[in-house]
Image (spheres, grey):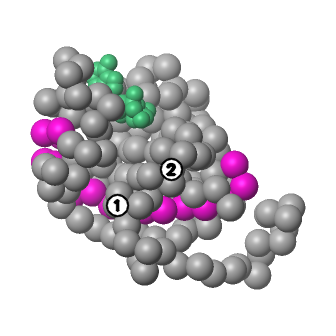
Amino acid sequence: MERTLVLIKPDGVQRGLVGEVISRLERRGLRIVAAKFMKVENKLAETHYAIHKGKPFYDGLIRYITSAPVLAMVWEGPNAIAAVRQTMGSTKPTEAAPGSVRHDYALEVGRNLTHASDSVENGENEVALWFKKLELVEWQREIDRWIFEK
Ligand code: DAT
Ligand code: MG
């Protein structure tokens, strides 16, 4: 089953959008695997965003993600990576599809509320970076067979 790391970034927490984002993922049919509310250390932020090091927005990005607590989560399901990226919307809120989180609640790329892994491989690496194995909960829902084909 595909897994994705989802972060509700500091702006999402501060604006009281934690429940809204979780609701949308639940309604979509995805299954939660792990969650923790945490302040992000600089080292974790730098590892998570290593690919963006050197870009003009990098320093601001690190300051933003470490500025206040985030809710870090793992969600799973068939096509979880694509589904969650779609639910969140494109990186730039003004390019995000109507109905997506970033379209409905954000205006600026530097305050775009959430993070979601962008490939299966990055999903696996990001889940391992943010969570210990023991924190990942394996479980079934009665309704799974009505949402997951296999
Ligand atoms: P995403 O968060 O959609 O995966 P990304 O991985 O390209 O987007 O970039 C990570 C974050 O960096 C993004 O959520 C916001 C910030 N960012 C990206 N491009 C930016 C830009 N051109 N200006 C300012 N911030 C940017
Ligand atoms: Mg990204």
The amino acid pointed to by label 2 is: Gly
Residue 102 x, y percent position in the rendering: 45, 35
Q: Secondary structure at mark 1?
A: helix
Residue density around tag 2, few if under 14, some if 14–19, many if 20 or more, within 10 Å = many
Quarter of the figure with residue 114: top left
Q: Is residue 31 above or below residue 114?
A: below
Whether residue 148 appears in this view of the structure is yes
- Are circles 1 and 2 on residues that touch, CB within 8 Å? no
Amino acid on which disc 1 is placed: Trp
Distance from disc 1 to disc 2, alpha carbons, whole Å, reads 11 Å
Does the magenta segment cover residue 71?
A: yes
Which residues are the magenta region? 62-79
The quarter of the picture showing ligand 2? top left
Residue at the spot 43% in from the left edge and 28% down from the top edge: 91
Which residue is denoted by mark 1 in the rendering? Answer: 130
| Secondary-structure class at tag 2 | helix
130 shown above or below 122: below
Q: Quadrant of residue 27?
A: bottom right
Q: Nearer the viewer, residue 141 or 136?
A: 136
Percent position of residue 71, x then y = 33, 61
Rate crowding at label 1 as few (under 14), some (14 to 19) or many (20 or more) other CA atoms within 10 Å.
some
Rendering coords of residue 55 (x, y %): 23, 20
Nearer-the-camera pick, 38 or 122: 122
Residue designated by label 2: 123
Picture quarter with the N terminus:
bottom right
| Residue 20 appears in view | no
Q: Quadrant of the C terminus?
A: bottom right
x and y percentages locating residue 120 in the rendered image: 58, 46
Magenta stretch: includes residue 90: no
Q: Earlier in the sequence, mark 1 or mark 2?
A: 2
